[in-house]
């Protein structure tokens, strides 16, 4: 097998793995919702959580002076 064929094969395997993972995550989310275990937040709260998340990432990646 050529390296290009190997690369394409590996890429396809990773795609299938990602698809399987994504399907599992979506199904788990729907299960939580159907069982009343899901927690919904407002758009404002979601935006605030995302800003906090981004700030933590930025702080972690700041170069040391």
Image: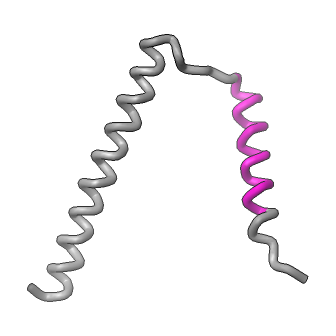
Dominant SS type (magenta): helix
Please tell me how many numbered marks the rendered image carries.
0
Q: What's drawn in magenta, residue-wise?
A: 42-58
- Name the spot of residue 59 as percent of width and height, x first: 81, 63
Q: Which residue lies furthest to the bottom in this view?
A: 2
Q: Is residue 10 left or right of residue 34?
A: left
Vertical relation: 32 (above or below) 64: above
Q: Is residue 64 left or right of residue 24?
A: right
Vertical relation: 46 (above or below) 8: above
- Name the spot of residue 54 as percent of width and height, x first: 74, 53
Q: Residue at 76% across / 65% down in the picture? A: 60
Residue 45 shown in magenta: yes
Q: Is residue 29 left or right of residue 3?
A: right
Q: In which quarter of the image is the N terminus?
A: bottom left
Q: Residue at 76% across / 29% down in the picture? A: 44
Residue 21 shown in magenta: no
- Name the spot of residue 50 as percent of width and height, x first: 71, 43
Q: In this view, does 62 lie to the left or right of 15?
A: right
- Name the spot of residue 43 as percent of width and height, x first: 70, 27
Vertical relation: 64 (above or below) 24: below
Asked which quadrant contains residue 65, the reply is bottom right
Q: Residue at 40% across / 29% down in the picture? A: 28
Colouring scheme applied when the structure was drawn: one colour
Q: Residue at 73% across / 59% down in the picture? A: 57
Q: Residue furthest left?
A: 1
């Amino acid at each position: 097998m050529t390296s290009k064929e190997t690369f394409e094969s590996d890429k396809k395997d990773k795609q299938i793995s990602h698809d399987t993972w994504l399907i599992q995550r979506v199904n788990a989310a729907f299960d939580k919702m159907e069982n009343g275990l899901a927690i919904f937040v407002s758009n404002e709260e979601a935006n605030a959580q995302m800003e906090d998340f981004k700030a933590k990432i930025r702080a972690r990646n700041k170069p040391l002076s």
